[in-house]
């Protein structure tokens, strides 16, 4: 699409999927922008993929595709329930009712493991995070 920014795609040799970082604002904007690239916010399916992402995208907090449904289940952009998780200690928090999306690498102590934190899309500085997007092998 003319005028759209380009992204640097990296292929995960284990699954053949392509991944990239985008920086467009908050989580809703990141999810919308991912579709421009025929992609979605990343769905992390196992520890190997998690490890590869941590090694490949060493960055401050990153939006991932995990979100809480109205029924309280955590699912990926495809609607598939999360069978693998990498929550930080005491996460996901049930104290804040609007913490319904997830970020990876949320604190300096979590950079090595890429642990996840449930957050709200409003308030704080969440709008400044980049996002990992993913698209299937072609």
Image (cartoon, rainbow, N blue to C red):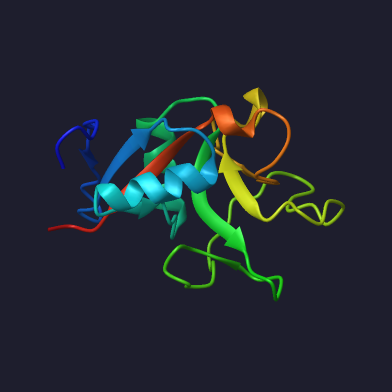
Task: Pick the quarter of the image with the C terminus.
Answer: bottom left
Q: Is residue 21 visible?
A: yes
Above or below: residue 80 compared with residue 33: below
Counting labels gives: 0
Above or below: residue 53 compared with residue 81: above
Image coords of residue 1 (percent x, y): 16, 42
Q: Residue at x 79, y 52 (%)?
A: 93
Question: Which residue is outermost to the right?
Answer: 95
Above or below: residue 40 compared with residue 110: below
Q: Residue at x 22, y 37 (%)?
A: 9
Does residue 36 appear to the left or right of 96 in the view shown?
left
Image coords of residue 49 (percent x, y): 39, 50
Answer with the quarter of the image where residue 108 lies.
Answer: top right
Above or below: residue 33 compared with residue 66: above
Image coords of residue 20 (percent x, y): 30, 38
Question: Which residue is outermost to the bottom?
Answer: 71
Q: Is residue 111 visible?
A: no
Give whichever of 59, 115 is nearer the camera: 59
């Amino acid at each position: 699409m003319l005028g759209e920014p380009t992204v640097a795609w990296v292929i995960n040799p284990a699954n053949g999927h392509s991944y990239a970082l985008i920086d467009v604002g908050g989580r809703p904007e990141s999810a919308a922008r991912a579709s421009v690239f025929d992609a979605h916010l990343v769905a992390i399916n196992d520890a190997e993929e998690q490890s590869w992402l941590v090694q490949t995208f060493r960055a401050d907090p990153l939006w991932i595709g995990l979100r809480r449904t109205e029924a309280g289940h955590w699912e990926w952009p495809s609607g598939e329930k999360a069978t693998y998780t990498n929550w930080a200690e005491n996460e996901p928090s049930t104290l804040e009712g609007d913490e319904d999306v997830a970020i990876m690498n949320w604190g300096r102590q979590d950079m090595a493991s890429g642990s996840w934190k449930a957050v709200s899309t409003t308030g704080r500085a969440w709008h400044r995070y980049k996002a990992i997007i993913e698209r299937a092998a072609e």
